[in-house]
Amino acid sequence: MSTTAQTGAISSIMSASSFFGCTIGGAVANRFGCRIAIVVGGLLTIAGMIGCALTRHIYQMYVLGALAGIGNGVAYTPAVVIVAQYFQKYYSLAASFMTTGDSIGIMLFGPLMQLFLDTYGWRGTLLVTGAVTANICVAGAVCRPNTRLLKARESESRDSCRNIPLNERGSLELQVITHPEQTDPQPIAMSQSSGKRRNNLCVHVAFFWTGVVKMFRLNLLCQSYRFSLFCFAQSVYVASLGCYLIYLIPRATGSSGVSDREASFLLSVVGISGLVGRPFCGLLNQKVSSEVIYDVSMVVCACAVLVAQFGTYGHFVFSAAVFGFAIGFQRTISPVLMREYVGMDNLGSAVGIYSGIGGVVDLIGPILAGALYDATESFAILFYVLAGLFVVGFLAMLSAPLLKRIEPGVYTSVDTELTV
């Protein structure tokens, strides 16, 4: 028999691995295209879910749960990119409808999972879930690349070839690099062999790191200071969000005397209000800039956390509703901001980078929050810290307009004008 902690670790592993899967998904989408990346992510998710149903040990479920989480992440990143390829003017509205899927899934799958568990048991439930996730492959198969975008890239490639200088005979004009005459090498002392091996190791490490930077386009962090700032703000947001959702119910039942049944309703309030907030954010973004919406949502999150400090059930419900509404804004506006900072060509890599950072924070944040509660034995102090973290993210993003003036900028190969 497995303990409750061991069983609960499965969901944590899946959640964290999905963040890292987004990083892999960005690289796969850049190399093979969004359609193939989504299908591959769906296959990994299916393999992980069905494999979990066939396991005999809890540690096998850890590995296969991580595989399913990685598959989810691999499929998510190209899904964000493919929507961005088809929408320019109304991208925020399209992103709002795209991100409502997880809220609807949370509301529907809660009672469905309980029904499946009562009917088929946990192994049968995992098999049914694996069959449902097979629809990811179907959705990926219909993600047709934007033909206008492909034609624009081909046209730019031909134009760049025409700009190569030619000589009178029509051949490429290349500069010949000459090297000085080589002399006979001098004998190398045996004492220098260890230094030579160290130099070779450094060369291999540098070569490997260069490949990693190129594959995941980590140079975006240096080219766009605003994107680096956004990653920092998002890491603060992810840590605070996870801790709020984890400790909201213990905060309500522990020191405020709210019943377990009433407290369990709070997470449903967060999900429903988040579902309402996402399309509203998409409409508001047609009139208000993305950075203003992001900053205001961070402040609203901080205020919502502070409202929970009053300790009554009504205040907890109000806090959950306002917090969920602000989360809906955050989830919608984040891909919009990233596309503004790094361009559409680099959107997949940007989602992967910030998701990788978020995965680390998602693992560490609840652990540090639990340590803080153990040290203080007070949920009030913990919630004050969470509100302060949201304020830190808000203050950091205020410097984005200044960084725009001094950052080197990100090169995008094409900027196709889409009217949708």
Image (spheres, helix red, strand yellow):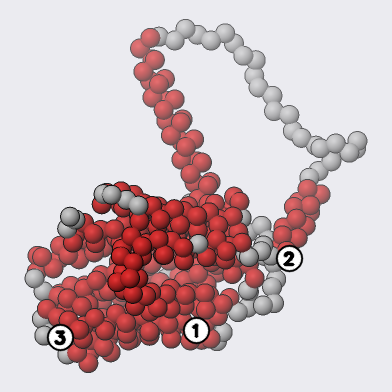
- Residue 279: mark in rendering: 1
Residue reaching furthest to the right: 169
The answer to which of marks 3 and 2 sits earlier in the sequence is: 2
Select label 1 or label 3 by which is in front. 3
Quick one: label 2, few (<14), some, or many (20+) residues within 10 Å? some
Q: What's the residue type where badge 2 is placed? A: Arg
Q: Work out how far the residue at label 2 is from the one at label 1, CA to CA, in angstroms.
A: 27 Å
Q: Residue at x 20, y 84 (%)?
A: 261
Q: What's the residue type where badge 1 is placed? A: Pro
Residue 33 x, y percent position in the rendering: 61, 55
Residue reaching furthest to the bottom: 314
Q: Work out how far the residue at label 3 is from the one at label 2, CA to CA, in angstroms.
A: 57 Å
Quick one: label 1, few (<14), some, or many (20+) residues within 10 Å? many
**SS at mark 3?**
loop
**SS at mark 1?**
helix
Q: What's the residue type where badge 3 is placed? A: Val
Q: Say which residue label 2 marks.
A: 148
The answer to whether residue 363 is visible is no
